[in-house]
Amino acid sequence: MSDIPVITIDGPSASGKGTVAERVARALGFHFLDSGALYRLTALSAMKHGVALDDEARVAALAASLPASFRDGAVWLADEDVTDAIRAEAVGEGASQVAALPAVRAALLDRQRAYREAPGLVADGRDMGTVVFADAVAKVFLTASAEARAERRYKQLIGKGNSASLSALVADMQARDARDTARAVAPLKPAADALLLDTTLMDIESAVEAVLAHYRSQQGN
Ligand code: DC
């Protein structure tokens, strides 16, 4: 199991880690795990079942038996395509709340580790390098200023025809960062052996190249 290489890409929301992780996985022919999607699916499932997001035991039970799958470029909860639904701001907010519950994190641990399959895995999230894949061959912590991240999210939302307020997005970004960083269990922080990559002034291609170069430099160590 531990012979299968894992590259972890952690960082705050809208740091670009999802896009970078997916492209690195494609470049190497590796599998890809978007761990945030599992927390988003858990929150969505709780909302659908009328379970309070702070009811730790019941939310953890939902997480443990989540009928989630990733197929054909879409995200499914049982037979419902929830690709767009899990990206709603309210679901992201709910994901951040349920992610602070230790029993929920424990319930998702084995499921995340099961994605480690040959020829390798690129995993993106908050605690991929610190907890879930602590033995990863290459770890990256991707960040960017809250303003830069809010601006990226703003462009995404406007591009999809939604209305958005940049100042509200900066405030949301800072609040979510604060909760993800301050929580007692698996807080958002770089692994001691992670490469820190600040993408405030970097485009996606350069970030992908930097991650691939880091992976190559770690191989054989
Ligand atoms: O990466 P994302 O925005 O889809 O993540 C949604 C929420 O899930 C985020 O607020 C933090 C949480 N999360 C986490 O705690 N641990 C992970 N490995 C991934 C996401």
Image (cartoon, helix red, strand yellow):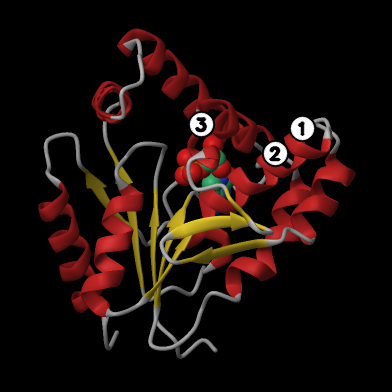
**Residue named by callout 2:** 98
Residue 151 position within the rendered picture, expressed as x and y whole percent measured from the top left: 25, 23
Amino acid carrying mark 3 in the image: Ala
Label 2 CB-ligand 1 distance < 8 A? yes
Q: Which residue is mark 1?
A: 53
Question: Gap in Å between the C-alphas at discs 3 and 1?
Answer: 16 Å
Residue type at mark 2 is Val
Q: Is residue 141 left or right of residue 68?
A: left
Dot label at residue 88: 3
Q: Residues within 10 Å of mark 2 (few under 14, many from 20)?
A: many
Res. 188 visible in picture: no
User: Residue 93 at x, y = what percent?
Assistant: 58, 28
Residue contact between numbered discs 3 and 1, judged by CB atoms under 8 Å: no
CB-based contact (under 8 Å), mark 1 and mark 2: yes
Please give the name of the residue rendered at 80% of the width and 51% of the height, measured from the top-left corner: 62
Residue 108 horizontal/vertical position (percent): 69, 60
Which of the marked residues, 1 or 2, is nearer the chain's N terminus? 1
Q: Secondary structure at mark 3?
A: loop
Q: Distance between the Cα atoms at labels 3 and 2?
A: 15 Å
Residue 13 sits above or below residue 192 on the image: above
Q: Is mark 1 within 8 Å of ligand 1?
A: no
Indicate the amino acid at tag 1.
Answer: Leu
Q: Element under label 2?
A: helix
Q: Nearer the viewer, mark 3 or mark 2?
A: 3
Tell us which disc is closer to us: 3 or 1.
3
Of callouts 3 and 2, the N-terminal one: 3
Q: Secondary structure at mark 1?
A: loop
Disc on res. 44? none
Residue 120 occupies which quadrant of the picture? bottom left
**Residue neighbourhood size for the residue with mark 3, other residues' Cα within 10 Å, grouped as few (<14), some (14–19), many (≥20):** few
